[in-house]
Image (tube, helix red, strand yellow):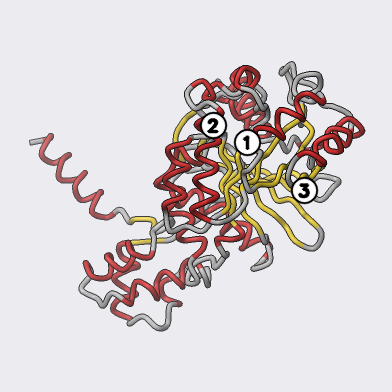
Amino acid sequence: MKYLVNLLFEIKLRAMEKTNLLGATLPELEDLMLELGEKEYKGRQLFKWLYNLQVSDFEQMTDLSQKLRKKLAERYFFVGIDAAEIASSADGTEKFLFRLVDNKLIESVLIPEGGKRTVCISSQVGCPLKCVFCATGLMGYDRDLTTGEIVGQLLFLRQRYGEDAFRNIVFMGMGEPLLNYSNLVKSIEIISSELGLSVSAKKITVSTVGITPQIHALADSDLKVNLAISLHAADDEKRRKIIPVARKYDLKKLMEAAVYFARQRKKRITFEYILFKDFNDSRRDAEMLAKLVEGIPCKINILAYNPIDNLPYRRPTDEEVDEFGRSLYPIAPAVTVRKSRGIDISAACGQLAGKAQKFEEDNAL
């Protein structure tokens, strides 16, 4: 009898629970309206209220009937994620540490570039790829982010800074976005929809260390996003030392996937190349890099390593970075030398979350 009472109580408790619509896509909200006995177009109206107008109170959604608003309020809610910590750099870079509902930590970084801002967002809690130079890799891997947790990072920034919070979006925060492919695709659909965040797909870049099957899938999708490949070495032997997954997806496979993406999309690939002092910064490395990308429509971003505590890799001087760029430019496609940002606030991926995680572990009871 006691078991039955407890079971009935649990069933009643579950019936009272509401569902957070954060991360719901347009087709999902259209289906929800049909399930509620409403017209499909009501889902489009709800989608616009939630993501474009950023209204989470159903009562304020005046083009929905009073009956529908009440029904929605009884079953659903819309709550984003909030920053647990914000760090500001002298160069204008800001890093946001978000605490999720399960107490996990992720990061976003907002980088000013002239009068515009680019935001780097996370796609996973930690990362399973364990690149040896990366602070996120040191954290290990907990789980993929949900669609709502991905989009929630951007909604927070819009709420804080308004519609001009950012111009460009890069999936280059914590995690490997192509290993969370389903939620990546759904979040981009919300972000790029005119009824959603209304950010053109041309302003969205997906960065990967080279998960080649998903590069092919992204090329074949309807998402007109840009692709950036984190290369960091122009030969397999060196690349495998710093990027373990390169043992599975070698440079031959990776370059074939890059060519396929460029041909399918008729746009340039971006190759990201972090310089590590006395590892991949020689003239010979520059020559190998130029040969590797020969014939691929691309541009190359050169960036000095952002130093991380307890890791052996060193940062080259600005002069050494500039010299590498000069040696590369005459023999390679477009080359950009980018300056590291937010060094004083630990802006490299995973540094802030890693420090917070370690502090909590060290002070746990």
Q: Residue placed at 52% from the left, 51% from the top?
A: 263
Between residue 190 and residue 286, name the one nearer to us.
Answer: 286
Instruction: Please determine whether, in this image, residue 79 is positioned above or below residue 67.
Output: above
Precedes in sequence: disc 2 or disc 1? 2
Mark 3: which amino acid? Thr
Residue 353 image position (x, y, % from top left): 63, 34
Q: How many numbered markers are drawn? A: 3
Residue 347 image position (x, y, % from top left): 73, 38
Q: Can you identify the residue that label 2 sits on?
A: 126
Residue 84 image position (x, y, % from top left): 62, 44
Q: Can you identify the residue that label 3 sits on?
A: 93
Q: Residue placed at 62% from the left, 62% from the top?
A: 158
In contact (CB < 8 Å): disc 2 and disc 3 = no
Instruction: Please determine whether, in this image, residue 75 is positioned above or below residue 59.
Output: above
* Separation of residues labelled 1 and 3 (CA atoms): 21 Å
Q: Can you identify the residue that label 1 sits on?
A: 230
Mark 2: which amino acid? Gly
Mark 1: which amino acid? Ser
Instruction: Please determine whether, in this image, residue 261 is positioned above or below residue 50.
Output: above
Q: Is residue 85 left or right of residue 210?
A: right
Local SS, label 3: loop
Q: Is residue 334 left or right of residue 3?
A: right
Local SS, label 2: strand
In contact (CB < 8 Å): disc 2 and disc 1 = no
Which of the image's four quarters has the N terminus?
top left
Badge 2: residue crowd in 10 Å (few <14, some 14–19, many ≥20): many
